[in-house]
Image: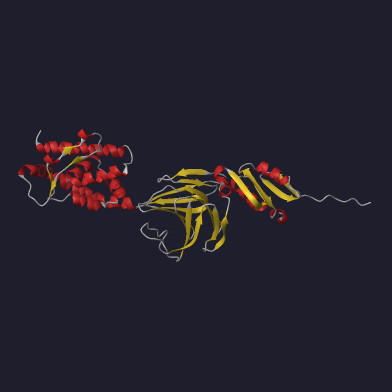
């Protein structure tokens, strides 16, 4: 086999190995870096890989994850005075396990190539030109795809709860009648709560910030697990582990997040709170902190286990919680009974046990009618006059 044919065969083999490696799953960081280095060696590498992966999706993915602009990669790969000779290639298979495409290449710059070493380029000239044109045609689409956020919507119906695993391995638990919009890109991970409540166990990612938006508020994760409850015009934030920062928009024209991991703080926003584990805060949409302090995080997040836990909360507030999960609705008409404080832990869907608990309270009585349960005061015994 001639020298240029051997070179072509070797590059084709390496390109095929890389293609199979990509199809088998996401590459490890070291493999991604090796893939980028392999592409930089010669325009033949780019051309051969493009011929196998015609959509060039893997090149875009690797360049995006490595932080290497695709234009720069292709520009360096197609330098005309970069010559590759077969003599400079040393197979690494004799050294044990290797990464696909792992071999050494000697590159000579700024020196005329010999006639023998020019032959592959002469024969491959048309192929290089076609590959370059294909790359140029695809480059805009790949760069747009790389920077375009991946947006997904998730929601639950009344009485439904749902557990999700996001692309970064963050775990999200959605409470009843809740909805979120997830938007991930290369620099940040963002979630908007459009209604209801969500609990987050955030996966670590040193390259991308994680934040949750509710109206004009932003809850920025500092490596933690936390709960965000959008209730009317208020937002309640409970930290189970770690720490969060709460920011508010300082101007209506501020963009959605304004987050950049290179900056010490989000642009156009003002920090209003710094919450640590075991603390909770209720914040108005204006940014005013209505309450803040320590809390039993397990009770506050008991809903993630399918329970309702309350400590010295009013009967009306607890009844409202049961109404979130059940079609059978509880109403408390008497304001004196509505304000009575109670404590306990119940299955969120076990209305009958909670109603029995209310019936056992002094001066309290329940009346069931179809899907409605009324909580009323016990009628006072009539006095008989002689």
Residue 56 seen in the current view: no
Taking the spot 48% from the left edge, 55% from the top edge, the residue there is 244
Residue at the extreme left of the image, as rendered: 115
Residue at the extreme front of the image, as rendered: 95
In the displayed structure, 10 sits above or below 229; it is: above
> Which quarter of the picture shows residue 127?
top left
Taking the spot 72% from the left edge, 53% from the top edge, the residue there is 337
Q: Left or right of 263: which side holds 15?
A: left
In the displayed structure, 255 sits above or below 82; it is: below
Q: Left or right of 269: which side holds 281?
A: right
Q: How many marks?
A: 0
Q: Left or right of 223: which side holds 339?
A: right
Picture coordinates of residue 105 (x, y %)? 16, 43
Residue 303 seen in the current view: yes
Residue at the extreme bottom of the image, as rendered: 251
Q: Nearer the viewer, residue 208 or 73?
A: 208
Q: Nearer the viewer, residue 82 or 252?
A: 82
Q: Nearer the viewer, residue 159 or 211?
A: 211
Quadrant position of the N terminus in the picture? top left
Picture coordinates of residue 233 (x, y %)? 55, 59
Q: Left or right of 70: which side holds 7?
A: left
Taking the spot 71% from the left edge, 46% from the top edge, the residue there is 358
Residue at the extreme right of the image, as rendered: 386
> Which quarter of the picture shows residue 39?
top left
Q: How is the image coloured?
A: secondary structure
Picture coordinates of residue 181 (x, y %)? 45, 51
Picture coordinates of residue 71 (x, y %)? 24, 53
């Amino acid at each position: 086999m001639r020298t240029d044919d051997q070179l072509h065969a070797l590059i084709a083999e390496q390109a095929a190995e890389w293609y199979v490696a990509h199809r088998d799953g996401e590459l490890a960081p070291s493999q991604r870096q090796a893939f980028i280095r392999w592409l930089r060696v010669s325009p033949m590498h780019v051309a051969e890989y493009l011929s196998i992966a015609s959509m060039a999706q893997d090149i875009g993915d690797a360049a995006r994850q490595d932080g290497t602009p695709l234009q720069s990669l292709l520009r360096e790969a197609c330098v005309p005075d970069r010559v590759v000779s077969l003599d400079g290639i040393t197979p690494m298979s004799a050294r044990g396990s290797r990464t696909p495409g792992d071999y050494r290449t000697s590159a000579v710059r700024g020196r005329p190539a010999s006639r023998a070493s020019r032959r592959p380029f002469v024969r491959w000239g048309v192929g290089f030109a076609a590959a370059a044109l294909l790359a140029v045609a695809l480059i805009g689409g790949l760069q747009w795809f790389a920077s375009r956020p991946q947006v997904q919507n998730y929601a639950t119906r009344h009485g439904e709860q749902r557990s999700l695993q996001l692309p970064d391995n963050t775990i999200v638990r959605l409470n009843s009648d809740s909805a979120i919009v997830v938007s991930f890109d290369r620099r940040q991970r963002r979630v908007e709560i459009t209604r209801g409540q969500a609990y987050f166990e955030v996966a670590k990612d040193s390259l991308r910030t994680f934040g949750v938006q509710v109206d004009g508020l932003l809850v920025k994760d500092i490596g933690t697990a936390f709960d965000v409850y959008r209730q009317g015009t208020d937002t309640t934030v409970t930290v189970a582990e770690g720490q969060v920062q709460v920011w508010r928009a300082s101007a209506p024209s501020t963009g959605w997040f304004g987050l950049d991991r290179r900056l010490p703080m989000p642009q156009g926003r003002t920090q209003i709170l710094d919450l640590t584990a075991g603390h909770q805060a209720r914040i108005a949409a204006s940014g005013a902190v209505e309450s803040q302090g320590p809390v039993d995080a397990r009770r506050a997040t008991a809903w993630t286990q399918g329970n309702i836990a309350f400590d010295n909360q009013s009967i009306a507030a607890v009844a409202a919680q049961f109404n979130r999960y059940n079609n059978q609705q509880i109403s408390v008409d008497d304001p004196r009974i509505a304000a009575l404080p109670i404590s306990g832990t119940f299955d969120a869907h076990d209305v009958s046990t909670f109603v029995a608990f209310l019936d056992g309270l002094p001066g309290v009585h329940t009346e069931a009618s179809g899907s409605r349960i009324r909580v009323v005061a016990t009628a006072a015994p009539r006095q008989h006059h002689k």
